[in-house]
Amino acid sequence: MKYIQNSSTDPYFNLALEEHVLNTFFGDDLLLLWQNDNTVVIGKHQNAVEEVNIKRAEELGVKVVRRNTGGGAVYHDMGNLNFSFITDWEPDKDMGYDTFLMPVIQALSKLGVDAEKMGRNDLGIDGKKISGSAQCVSKGRILHHGTLLISSELDVMADILNAKTGKIASKGIKSVRSRVANINDYVKEPLDAKHLKMALIASFFGSGSVDEFILDGAQMTEIEKLAREKYSSWDWNYGKSADYSYINAKLFQYGMIEVRMDVRNGVIERCKIFGDFLALVGVEDLENAVIGRRAERRELKQALEGFELQRYYGVLLDDLLECFE
């Protein structure tokens, strides 16, 4: 077994590192421990706008990135530690969640934390979730990775993951919200990521020596390229979202505005604007202006800011943009 140390807190780099290791390192069992700073990580088959309060995330500087495994959306900050274990995929052996979570449970036990498996892929304490996991198989290798909430800002998590899903009818996989807690809520002496890393390494390696693998310059270049071209791209994080239909109505001083649209691969295919606001002209030009545009505020602002909205008697650009969010 080898341990790959990673001090990066950039989610794009960290997920690129994980993918690179999964698809290019063969023969050894591999352990990675890493942290993302202020990030929402959504499952491979999820719709970003359905899972994340995008506007609030932008206000708080929280990044949104899609991972290669299924499951629900999770919030990462420096109070959370992520673990990844990669080994050969052997379908004849038990490679379920219990197998990979046992060393984590044992590590927590050594620290005085009485965690247990909950449901299919979570760990919890007193019925509250402290860890979630997911898996994928690629090129004969299996990746099992998960989170460990140590001292995460749970209020921020609730704020960011409080997407207004009632407006959206999506074909994506929706997250199942669980009651969550931090590990430090259940220990006498607060833990930090360093202590938990040491415990996890000891649990995964057992009595064997820790063989640390250092990435070389060429490998770092490949990982940085993957981070730049895939994980930080709009196409991967938003364009890969499941198709969805959207309805949002808001009441303003000058009347009601209702927006209905169909979105495919993150791009608006159809749009209709309704309302009881007074107008000198129709809304067809506004509707046509957003068709073919990405369903994101900055691009929609560019599409609509050239119109003379005074012809709609009081309609403001920011109000109209709110109806697309």
Image (cartoon, rainbow, N blue to C red):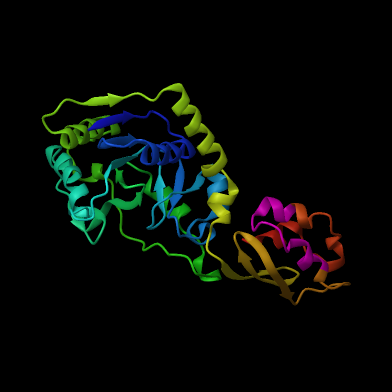
Q: Is residue 114 above or below residue 205?
A: below
Tell me the quarter of the picture where residue 192 sits.
Answer: top left
Query: So how many labels did they put on this image?
Result: 0
Q: Tell me if residue 56 can be seen.
A: no
Nearer-the-camera pick, 290 or 230: 230
Q: What span is in magenta?
A: 285-301
Residue shown at the point (10%, 30%) measured from the top left: 207
Q: Is residue 67 above or below residue 2?
A: below
**Residue 300 highlighted magenta (yes or no):** yes
Question: x, y (%) of residue 65?
Answer: 49, 47
Magenta stretch, main secondary structure, is: helix
Q: Is residue 8 left or right of residue 104?
A: right
Judge whether residue 84 can be spotted in this image: yes
Closer to us: 314 or 294: 294
Q: Quadrant of the N terminus?
A: top left
In the image, residue 287 lies at what x, y percent? 76, 68
Q: Residue at x 23, y 55 (%)?
A: 91
Q: Horizontally, is 320 left or right of 90 in the view?
A: right
